[in-house]
Amino acid sequence: MRVRRTLAALAVAAVLLLAAAAASLWRARNLERSAAAPTAGRLPVAASFYPMYFFAARIGGDRAQIFDVTPAGTEPHDYELTPLDVARLERSRLLILNGAVESWGGKVSRLLNPRRTLVIVAAQGLMTRHGEANSDAVDPHVWLSPRLAQKIARRIEKAYIQVDPVDATYFAANARTLTGKLQALDAQYRRGLARCAQKDIVTSHAAFGYLARDYGLTQVAIGGLSPDAQPSPRRLADIVNFARKNGVKTVFFERLVSPKLSQTIAREIGAKTMVLDPIEGLTAVDAAAGKDYFTQMRQNLADLRSALQCR
């Protein structure tokens, strides 16, 4: 009898668990459907990852519903599209790509109906530099240069106007505001990095080539253009020797990837570590705290000034 009661209790528990799982799945599917459906009266726009999303949101304002394809806190170089992503992209009137970060960009562009969705490569023609450890690849990190970011903003503005000419004046005004803030940011970087005791930055991956070029710094990257590109033992030894020879006191790492290599080199040369954010994505916690592209760029400037002993 006791065994029967136990089995009956287990059966009831199993039924309850299955019911809870089914309810959870139903809620998730309904959330997906509502997320995929564009809001009436707002232009559905997709942006491949955070910097493109931020610029698109600033220009689109309340006339656009922006979908950031890469989830919060996710490294975008290796992100793979889900079926829900594809469905939302098919609903979009505009898709904004960087052009080199997205492994899926070329394929999905060919799948989308060009009469429905305009696809732009916002960084096309701007990606001219090569990475420290991967000299045969184009550097995609143009958004880290406030000067190049202004050109990206203007291209996004033109794309908005092309798909929604009725709101052209609105988009143009928002784009002017954004480019004005980017010009001010450029001025802050020029002043902030003009007089520094050190000009060499050792970074976890080769994301800061344009920024270094614009403000007279030298980037020495541990990895390549992608954060998961692993350096050779020879490369690590060369970086240690360079850092010792040039008096490097700070090794930079980033939040969305492991800091182990940066920490290893820092220990080897007796240096400290510090975050230098490539702003490829924000975590949900960061976004909730009000952080955005500009707050992170200003934080990067403050950390560079500290590490490089700028006056």
Image (cartoon, helix red, strand yellow):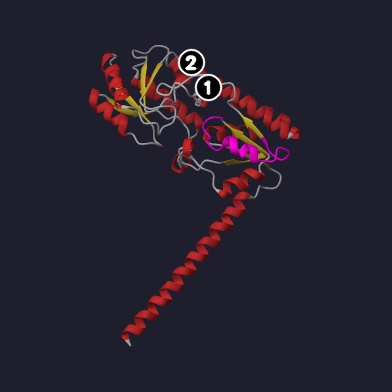
Q: Is residue 287 left or right of residue 234?
A: right
Does 289 appear above or below 177? below
Quarter occupied by residue 301? top left
**SS assignment for the magenta stretch, majority:** loop
Q: Position of residue 38 (x, y in %)?
A: 66, 47
User: Is residue 249 in sight in this rendering?
Assistant: no
User: Is residue 232 in sight in this rendering?
Assistant: yes
Mark 2 in CB contact with mark 1 (< 8 angstroms):
yes
- Labelled disc at residue 214: 2
- Labelled disc at residue 83: none
Residue appearing at x 58%, y 22% in the figure = 150
Q: Which quadrant is home to the N terminus?
A: bottom left
Q: Is residue 238 left or right of residue 100?
A: left
Q: Which quadrant is home to the C terminus?
A: top left
Answer with mark 2 or mark 1, whichever residue precedes in sequence: 1
Q: Position of residue 189 (x, y in %)?
A: 46, 18
Does 156 appear above or below 25? above
- Residue 130 part of the magenta-drawn span: no
Residue range of the region highlighted in magenta in the rendering: 99-118
- Labelled disc at residue 146: 1
